[in-house]
Image (cartoon, helix red, strand yellow):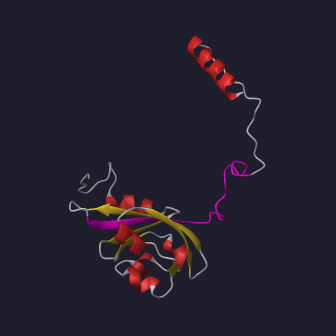
Amino acid sequence: MPKYSDHIHGMDFDTFFSIVDAMYDELLIYDGNYNIVYINQACARHYCCTPNQMIGKSFFDFVNNDWWGPSILPIIYREKKAYAIKQKTYVGSELLTIAVPLFDENNEIRFVVMNVRDQVNDIDLYNPHYISKEYKLDTKFVPVAESDEMKKALSLAEKVSG
């Protein structure tokens, strides 16, 4: 694992963490003892609180008070592998959480990193037709081949496809 002193690829830590804080997805990091060591600003949207209200607290402080559920973290610690889960928060956010364990040299969990995504309804979708059922692939597209090898490959593809 790379070691960083005071820069991340030419970027100081303050700049790096301001970028991570601006991410739309929530980034949540637990230590090996179920304590939150980092969470970015997306937690305000998911739980109506600030990172400072969550960092340093135990997972159990939140899950025992029904902040979200169902919870995947105990399964990650037990099975030591990555999982994804759909969850709901007490403020009504529906989340897709992907949890990935990071191990120390003794294969014990050192951290669990979670990427948490909610609905992206508030963000303009650049190409709304891409995910629409009405979107149809242009079947009139004809690939162009100039080399003999590409012409042979296209001819073979046509034979195989139909």
| 76 shown above or below 126 | below
Q: Residue furthest top?
A: 148
Q: Position of residue 150 (x, y in %)?
A: 59, 17
Q: Residue at x 68, y 28 (%)?
A: 161
Q: Residue furthest bottom?
A: 65
Which quadrant is home to the C terminus? top right
**In this view of the protein, which residue sits in the foreground, 128 or 33?**
33
- Which residues are the magenta region? 108-132
**In this view of the protein, which residue sits in the foreground, 50 or 77?**
77
| 53 shown above or below 127 | below
Q: Position of residue 65 (x, y in %)?
A: 48, 88
Horizontal relation, residue 53 to residue 122: left or right: left
- Magenta residues, dominant SS class: loop
Q: Position of residue 29 (x, y in %)?
A: 38, 68
Q: Residue at x 44, y 83 (%)?
A: 62
Place residue 106 in its image quadrant: bottom left
Q: Position of residue 129 (x, y in %)?
A: 73, 49
Place residue 36 in its image quadrant: bottom left
Asked if the stretch drawn in magenta spans residue 121, the answer is yes
Q: Residue at x 51, y 85 (%)?
A: 66
Q: Residue at x 68, y 23 (%)?
A: 158
Image mark count: 0
Horizontal relation, residue 131 to residue 16: left or right: right
Asked if the stretch drawn in magenta spans residue 38, the answer is no
| 21 shown above or below 5 | below
Q: Residue furthest left?
A: 106
